[in-house]
Image: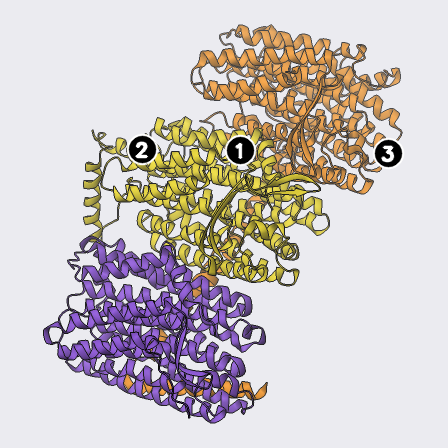
Chain colours: A orange, B purple, C yellow
Amino acid sequence: MTPGLLLIGVPAAAGLAGLLSRHRRPATYLAIAAPAFTLAMAAICAIVNPRFALTLADFGPIQVDLALDLSGTAAAVAIATAFVTLLVQVYSAPYLRDDPRYPPFAAQVNLFCAAMLLVVAADDLVFLLIGWEVMGACSYLLIAHYAKLPEAPGAAAKAFLVTRFGDVAFVLGVMILGASAGSFRISEVAHVPNGTAAAAMLLILFGCIGKSAQFPLQIWLPPAMAGPTPVSALIHAATMVAAGAYVLTRLIPVWPAHLTIVVALVAAVTMVGAGLCALAATDLKGVLAWSTVSQVGFMFAAVAVTAGDAALFHLVSHAAFKALLFLTAGVVIALAGTNGSLRSTRLRPGDSPLAFWAMTIGLASMAGLPPLGGFFSKEAVLGAAYEAGTSAGVVVFWAGVGASILTAAYSARLWLLLFWRGAPAMETVKVPRAEAFSLWALMFATAGVGMVYYANLFHVPDLHLDLMALLLLATLGGFAVIADAWWRGHRRAVPALDDERDPAGVLGRARPALAAGLHAERLADRTTRAIARTASATARTLDERLVDRTAVEGSARATLAAAEETAAGHRGGLVRYLRLSAAGTLLVAVVAIGVSLWT
Amino acid sequence: MQVQLIDHVAMLPLYLAAGAAVLALFAGRFAKACMMSGLGASAVAALWVSGGEDRATFAVGEWHSYVADDAAMGAAALFAGLSVLVAAVSGRQSGEYWFLLAVSAAGGITLAGARDLITLIVALETLTVPLYVLVTKPGRDGAEAGVTFLIASIASSATALMGAAFLYAAAGTVHLEGLAAGLADAAPGFVAAGAALLLGGLAFKLAAAPLHAWAPLVLERAPLAVATYLASASKLGGAVAIVWVVYFGLATDAGASTGIVVAALSVASIVVGNLGALVQRRTVPLLAWSGIAHAGYTLAPLAIVATTAGRGDTAAAASAALTYAVFFVLLEAGAFAALTAVRESGEGGPITELTGLWRSAPLPASVFLFAVIGLAGLPPALAGTFAKVAVLEVLASSAVWLAAIVAAGSILGLAYYLPLARTVLLGRGPATAKGRSAIAVAAIGLALLAVTLAPQLVLDFTAISH
Amino acid sequence: MLVLAVAVPFFGAVLVWAWRDRAFAHWIGAGAAALALAAVAVLPVGRGGGDWVSVGGSLSGGWWHEVEFAWAPSLYLDFSLAVDGVSWPLALLTALLGLLCCLHNALGAERRTAAALQVPPPGAATGGRPRRRLRAVNVRGRAAGDASEVPGIPSPVLTSLLLAVQFASTLVFFADDLILFFIAFESVLLPMWAIIRRYGDPAARRRAAAKFALFTVGGSLIMATGLFVAVADTGTADLGAIIVAGGVDPGISLLVFTLLAIGFAVKAPLWPLHSWLPDAHTAAPTAGSVLLAGVLLKLGTYGLIRVAGGIAPHGAADAAPVLAVLAVLGILVAGLVCLSLPELKRLIAYSSVGHMGFVVLAFATGTEAGIRAALFGNLAHGLITPLLFFLAGALKARAHTGLLGSLGGLRLAAPVFAGLLGFAAFASLGLPGLAGFWGEAFTVYAAAERGGAWLALAAAAAFGAFLAAAYLLRMLRRVSHGPLVPATSGIGDTSTAELVVWSPLVAGTLLLGLMPGPLLDLFGEGLL
């Protein structure tokens, strides 16, 4: 049994077994033991880098292989995934202490983890697809976890459907690629002709856009906040959202060079747009959600300049700080006793130093302050863009700089709004020890992930001093804008609780629109609903009225009518009978004579 | 002129049947027994004759008027057997009843062996004429049925005779084999008219369109036992006559026009029969109308002689038609016999009165069900399925369009057979009917079961060749 | 063993029928079904006894076993049975579903749960007597023009009919003689008709049963015509021999294929010949729906792939575009219609049209991958949709309604039940890792492989899979999520009996999803 198989098999089995479990205690043990074991396996994989393949399904001319390839970078991502899952599980046990549906929840998280690890490790596109879509299904289940929350099922269904819409293209792309290459192995599909590759990759890109909530399929991510906070941490940090970027990095060799500009444009629009939305968002988890979209945009940007390792580096560091931020957000919301709206959620730093510092470190890393992980990874991405020397590079470089400014801005805004508006006095709730453990672990990870740069695990460009300066400048610029807005409000002596004080005011009139994600979600919602309703009605008309009622039952009715006519035509006794017979016989005779004479 | 030797062995079944008729006339109380045993002996004799080599007699040169080959003797045995069945379900009747029935059976046996037009038509008349009396029940309705049947029959006989006359004029002979040889040089229009009139007239017996309309009326108003005879033996007579005429006489040189006539009769019967049956609410008319459709299926394979390719397969087509006829009359006989057994009043009545029959009279009900399902052509009543397979196999090779019509007709058939079956099987009414004539019903049920399990029994007899 | 596999359900049906008044009749039925399953299950043992086809000098596949008895040679009818890698899984599925349906019936799973809710559980509910009395009451009720019998009352006659369907279907899968194939194909009709007509939903069963019967018999007669054309052309009715010989003459291949395809398309069903299906599935009792979806539809696809494709390969190639376009239309129309259907069973029924569209599309591509995908998807559908029907039937029995609008909160009322429903829905929408995925994904592959205009079909099929997700999630959202509604409040969770019946399907779905390889290899050595 290779560690690679165990890596995926153990959490999957734990997940499936957990689904059958009805009791909390064994579920908890299973929930924590499985990712811990997985983490160990991932570490082993990082050392031995197993490769493994056997045929899973033989379709004649083409096979699907159960193929794993845990090279160095993949193992790193696997470690990050397992690590985050473990901490999320540790965190969830107390977080959902009053929830009777905890056992299935924990099981689903494990399944989710297994699915992501499958995506990370798979060397076969169709095999990968298993993890890819199981992840979508798990996200559906987890987002819909709260039975009482009215919007949860809708948000869950939306998350699944939007990503599955992307998967329509993804599957198609994979199949075209496979049909052209005669194999689904990632290592073997690189040699397909350019035209096919272009079509296939554009389709696959669309799938990745859906999974990673990039423009224009970002609409599912903000409502997905209806799920429990640990789920958000899981989805955003290490699994689903990152999966799209990850798969693109694996497929970089297939990309035709001239098409990277498409990725670049997607990344640029997403980075900047999501940054603006994050700045305007009115909800703690909303800010984090939009920031995820924007940060994953950075990964796409790295892909656009074919710097796969830079993308993965950012993925790993993003996993650390975003998990930290989400888990902390859960703590903060619990402490403040609110629903997460920025208007009401506020603490003083002293209320919970742990939450304060965890949030501070996470935000600083996201904003890109050295020496935290975010700084290195973002620098790596921008450096790669800078060195690329392609038009795609130019686009993502400047978009990245702009997005960095925005990142700094929304990070600072969140920090100010959360901790520096004072708070009504309330009894301090102690952060459960397990939750605190997760936060501590993630804080260390966030701080330490920058060191990975020096470990040369990822092949990323060297640090450029000028770029570092530029990035710092951008970050500080972002801070400056927010600080300016904040202090101006302060000077006008607007009470800190007032909405006026919100530095998001710098966005001016565009703010409500941006806060609502430019209404894209509502618009998409309405359009799809309208289209679905019309299409469905049309189909039913066609199917039920035309085919069933008119063609099928209509013919039955016509037959019955003809039958009545026939029966009626035969009533009338002997005379009519003789007439009928004579006429019929004569007709037959005439026809026969006519035909025989004619031939 | 050479004096012919008459092959009395070949004639044996006919002698026995005729003897039974005469005996029945004089036997008084034992008329029924005499008639049944005589006809039974006739059937056995027919089977025995068929077991030996083919026989023929009444020759003019190479052409024989009476042939006792396997197919003929099989049909003869069936005629005799069906008459016995009808006699068994007839209950108590006066002496002339048995005589007339036996005479009719003798006509059928003659018909089976007939190979010239005159013998054929005379045999057919012998088969039919006694029925004029039998169908007439006392009362106005009975009289109307009798008169209708009489006039219809006479009209059809006239038509057939006219056709026969035309053909005689064209070929100079009435022997079927002579027709086969003699029609080649005749005027095609003349031949076509002859074929159309002859076949149209013969189709009367089969109740095929356009001479079909008597069937629902007469069958409904005749006593049920006689209706059983009309629906089985009498129809077998029509089928046999048409198959003989087409196969031995017309197919070779008048194939084109014959094929067209048969196709027209067949299609018209299928359409009219099914449509008519679809709206019937009474049992006997439903079976009668559907019988018209079955007449159409019987004729269908013969229609392939219209094309040159089809004429190569005439033997197969004739076999298929005869096969279908045999299976079909067996099923009809089963249905009518079972119905006769459960209807005290001697008339069919509305379908709804059969509700719950399954509970009150299981044996006739199961035979009836089996027959109805077989008529619908569905397993487990494979007799009907085999019949359909035989027809479709022939049509599939030469006339796919006709196969499609047959198929469409069968679909329509299901639309009325299934509700009928449902009424008998699933309905839960206050039915109190008791089965009578259990042995007869069981016998026809066993016969149906036998041909279901071993269709080759029938197929061996219906394989026709020169 | 072959004969045994066919004969056991037949005699089981007869025995159950004969002893229909006894309490143990159910268990005779279940026993017969179990025996039949065992007989089918051991068929792979010692395979290779029949004719094997050798291609390029090496044995590549063929019949595992063959038996043959002459029946009616004049009609080309032989009682000849054969089994190979294509028919065996389907026969196994049939036997499994037959057993499950008999068990379902025997355990009276639905009735017991329903009864437990309304009246105190009757002491000797399994005994024959109380049931008979109950039936008698219903009889009187119906005679008075009242509502008909309560659905779900287990009756030995139903078991007998189920076994009859199982017998006929198994015979279809094993028939090596075209005429026998046709007869077996027709044999399915009557018992199934009786199941719908006798045990179906009182409001709809009359029309549904009639429609089902007429459509089916129409299809099978057209198919029969095609078969007979083929028999006339090749001079033999031996399916295996015709396939090995390369089918009928290319000149009439298209005609033969068209006739056969129309016949099988009715059964499969292929749009627009499907309109009997929603009515029949909706009106049928649970066990009937299960057999309809799990077995009867398979007859159509099996016939299409093995018989139509086998004896008229040229025609299949010529007709492929038409078939493919209709299949895709079916996928899309079914998906769209499902988006707004208000009733649970009808929705599942329509979804079958979509799934079968995938199977037909995969077959139409004519590539090796496509055919394997078609066979796989076929089998997967036979596991998943019956599970859905079992669940829907159980739900309707509990909640007394199948309207999506009046259901909700199942997750709170019956978590295990809701979990199973979710599982089945995910399987049905083709989630990778479950059985539904392989067939549908490789349908897309096969279409993409053909290139050109087929790409558009591939895209449409992929979009159809998306629609499946949309309507199934809509269904889940209405049924499982949301607050408790009156219909679902207080309904019991799954009983052990139900779990016993359903678990093989769940296990099979998982197994096929995770390990599709062995089954695909079986298909690979099949005679096509």
Q: Secondary structure at mark 2?
A: helix
Residue A523: tell me if it is visible.
no
Q: Nearer the viewer, mark 3 or mark 1?
A: 1
Q: CA distance from mark 1 to mark 2?
A: 35 Å
Image quadrant occupied by the N terminus of chain B:
bottom left
Percent across and percent down for residue C346 are 43, 46
Q: Does C79 sit left or right of A345 as displayed? A: left
Q: Is residue A375 above or below residue C509?
A: above
Q: Amino acid at mark 3?
A: Ser
The residue indicated by pointer 3 is A391
Percent across and percent down for residue C128 are 22, 36
Q: CA distance from mark 3 to mark 1?
A: 66 Å
Tell me whether circle 1 and circle 2 mark residues in contact (CB < 8 Å): no
Q: Does A547 sit left or right of B295 as displayed? A: right
Percent across and percent down for residue C136 are 19, 45
The residue indicated by pointer 2 is C107
Name the chain letter of the residue that bears numbered label 2: C
Q: Nearer the viewer, mark 1 or mark 2?
A: 1
- Structural crowding at the residue carrying mark 2, measured as other residues with C-alpha within 10 Å and reported as few (<14), some (14–19) or many (≥20): many
Name the chain letter of the residue that bears numbered label 3: A
Disc 2 and disc 3 on one polypeptide chain:
no
Q: Is residue A379 above or below residue C100?
A: above
The residue indicated by pointer 1 is C46
Q: Amino acid at mark 1?
A: Gly
